Image (cartoon, helix red, strand yellow):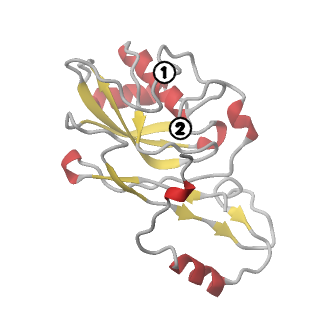
Amino acid sequence: ERGADRGARHREEVGGRPRLGRRRRSSSRACIHPSPPHPLRGGADGGQLVMEGGRVIKLVIEYDGTGYCGWQIQPNGRTVQGEVEAAILRVTGEAVRVAGAGRTDSGVHALGQVASLITSSRLPAPRLHAALNAVLPRDIAVLAAEDAAPSFHARFSATGRRYRYTILNRPVRPAFARWTALHVPRPLDEAAMREGARRLVGTHDFSSFACN
């Protein structure tokens, strides 16, 4: 299946709550145009930079990932993280590193990607929220921005993620859902699918799926 919803749960003390994100089929167009130049390009893989006397800002971001090479900054492709960091640079004049709760792949969408950053800007969170949306591309939107606890980190404070897989089971190919669902024109064995899914319920060790 090429579509999945994902989100991250965060501890209550940092004010997080479960969100969903939607994954679409990856697009070859995503990795053609690089994100705007950024002074921190090639730095840490999504880790927010420590800044003396800075404040932590939590963002909740919604995006259509069709035209992106995923969340994480890539040397030769346009990414969501790159666009968000470029927008922050434009609004605050600061080059900051934004950490995401998860690093979505090429073509993956999010209904609530949680991100965090450290900034010395005194711009109130509501004004930062509005300013970022004014300069971000139309396929990326900041749903919320707020000051967070100094210890908050979008990735390391996350306690869980949620996924949703969508299958469109009908003979005719979709016009509107072609990027949000897997089209299966043939009949499906729903009983076998439910039995297979049942085996995933519970706590499991998926370390063998990791790269290292």
The amino acid on which the numbered mark 2 sits, given as a three-letter code, is: Trp
Residue at 69% x, 32% y: name it: 31
Q: Is residue 53 above or below residue 18?
A: above
* Label 2–label 1 contact, CB within 8 A: no
Residue at 49% x, 57% y: name it: 207
**Nearer the observer, 175 or 147:** 147
Q: Is residue 126 above or below residue 171?
A: above
**Nearer the observer, 212 or 78:** 212
The amino acid on which the numbered mark 1 sits, given as a three-letter code, is: Ala
Report the side of 122 relative to 187 (left or right): left
Displayed quadrant of residue 119: top left
Image quadrant occupied by the N terminus: bottom right
**Nearer the observer, 13 or 93:** 13
Q: Which residue is mark 2?
A: 71
Displayed quadrant of residue 191: bottom right
Residue at 58% x, 84% y: name it: 195
Residue at 59% x, 79% y: name it: 196
Kindly state the secondary structure of the residue where label 1 is placed: helix
For label 1, the crowd category at 10 Å Cα-Cα, with few meaning under 14, some 14 to 19 and many 20 or more, is many
